[in-house]
Amino acid sequence: MFRGIERILQPTSLPPGGAPPQGLVAFYWHYAKQARGFLAALFILGSVAAVLDLALPFFIGRLTGLVAQNDPQTLLREHWGQLAGMAAVLVVARPLVLLTQSLITNQILTPGLTNLTRWQSHWHVVRQSWSFFQNDFAGRVAGRVVQTGASLRESVVSSTNSMWHVLVYGTSAILLSGAMDAALALPLLIWFACFALLLRFFVPRMRDRSRLNSEARSALTGHIVDSYTNILTVKLFARAQDEDKFVREAVDGHTEAFHAQQRLNTLFAFLLSLLNGTLITATGGVAVALWAQGLITVGMVAVALPLAWQLSGFSWMLAQSVTNIFEAIGTVQDGMRSIAVPTQMLDRPDARQLRIAKGEIRFENVHFGYGTRKGVLHDLNLTIRGGERVGLVGHSGAGKSTLVNLLLRFYDVESGRILIDGQDIAGVTQESLRGHIAMVTQDTSLLHRSVRDNIRYGRPNATEKDIREAAAAAHALEFIERLEDSQGRRGFDCLVGERGVKLSGGQRQRIAIARVILKNAPILILDEATSALDSEVEAAIQEQLGELMEGRTVVAIAHRLSTIAQMDRLVVLDHGKVAEEGPHAALLAAGGAYARSWDRQSGAFETAPRLRGETEPGKHRADGAAAMTP
């Protein structure tokens, strides 16, 4: 039974169209409407449960009246039907209603709506632009996604169950008391009015302080995650005490926000306790006075007092629920800062799939500056022919990485356009664009999954044979087969740790190269692709990359000029423009910025040419080959 019910609401269904709304109510409805049938059922069941709870004081009063008016012999004989009916309500009807409530709440909404919200929030967030993730802590974004799911469900279900239950019960209690005697309803009416005033005063303040508390907790999470993420830097610089101070400030801020929230909760609890005590006392006093005047029976007194007592008990439940609801709302509001954010890099509605024929890349009058007035690229024009291998050279900040980021459409150009085989990349889908580009970065980051999964990321349908061949081509097979993790997994099954931390820099880079080999894309970008490798492995990998580059359009960035000297053409960037371009030998002969950089780098390895019998440092060989070991 349980499994069948639990499968009714599928948490991983695709979200409704568009980003989650930025308004609080609209944000709630964006997710809650997908479970509206169950919430409506919970709403109805709450009303029925409240009426059944109201039956208990009525049954107590009725039973008290029957006992007072009948002797034991006639009670069961004449009133067995009423007694059996009361027993059926308490033993059958009420448990069945509560069971149905529990099934909907615990089996459907608690796991289903919670994880549906998390999944669909993640689905939206993971499609945000790269710059979105650069502007926040990854841990904080993840924490918001996870916490928002639970908090949204908690506030929706608690509001439906608790607040509606008390409202229905209280209204019914007033009607029942008024039916016995109008004076009995007066304490309940006054209590409701005072309770409403309490809520009106405290609820907005609870909401605001809950939001501040949630923001402070989120900041604390961000501080802790930042320390853990950069733990190597903390250790290398022996700055544990500085990190203590950094996190302590966040802890103190969260503690102060927490205290402010709890002060309200304590004051609200005290005033509610005072109000409830007054209700029970006033109801008892009025009931006894009416009984003394002969206006009501003993049975009615027995109804009035449990009504007031139960209402006060439900109000405590509601008070706790209100605290939880607004703490949850504060968490949701904090989560919306990462979730309810319009997607920054949307494909156009008419975006097409990129089609690659030759792989020609053209930058036409491209201007870009990350929104700054100074800018990085200024009316840059550059054509890379299909199948051509081009090296990008220039000092730090010249625009090399920016050019690559624009080609990958991590950012949109501010003016001008970029074309691949005549197709403006702004008019094609980002998935198809990046699907045709393979890239090896200097800062290689691996997924915390198996070696096999990391390599297969290049081509999900790759066979085991394909994966092994790619690993062998990247000179990674030998070290992969020696790997073993803490759980005893070996070789390709071994987990690499967060960002690949269990592997050396060279091992990570070889796995990344294997992944690119497997992807087999027509456009290849190399950003210091062999910077983490030792010279022997680098020479082997350079040979393999040479084979990989055949027939592909290649854009390579390198600070060691020797690694790109054999490219078909070198492009020197300076202040966001093309300063020089041409083959290695021609640029050396020109004696410009490239030649000066080459001389500086060659001069740093004075022993290399002497060992190899080559020319002296700083001298240019006639054939344009490197004056240092490539």
Image (cartoon, rainbow, N blue to C red):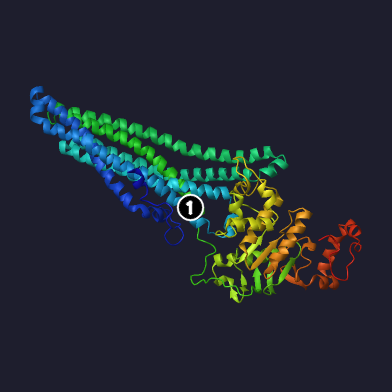
- The residue depicted at 39 percent of the width and 34 percent of the height is 269
- The residue depicted at 70 percent of the width and 72 percent of the height is 388
317 or 276, which is in the foreground? 317
Rendering quarter of residue 626? bottom right
- The residue depicted at 59 percent of the width and 65 percent of the height is 434
Rendering quarter of residue 104? top left
Crowdedness of circle 1 by 10 Å Cα count: few (<14), some, many (20+)? many
144 or 98, which is in the foreground? 98
The image position of residue 160, as x and y in percent, is: 33, 46
Quarter of the image for the C terminus: give it: bottom right
- The residue depicted at 27 percent of the width and 47 percent of the height is 44
Question: Residue at label 1?
Answer: 336
The image position of residue 421, as x and y in percent, is: 61, 75
Label 1 secondary element: helix
For the residue marked with disc 1, what is the amino acid?
Met
Position above or below: 558 against 272: below
510 or 175, which is in the foreground? 510
Left/right of residue 230 with respect to residue 297 in the rendered view: right
Which residue sits furthest front?
465
Position above or below: 532 against 422: above
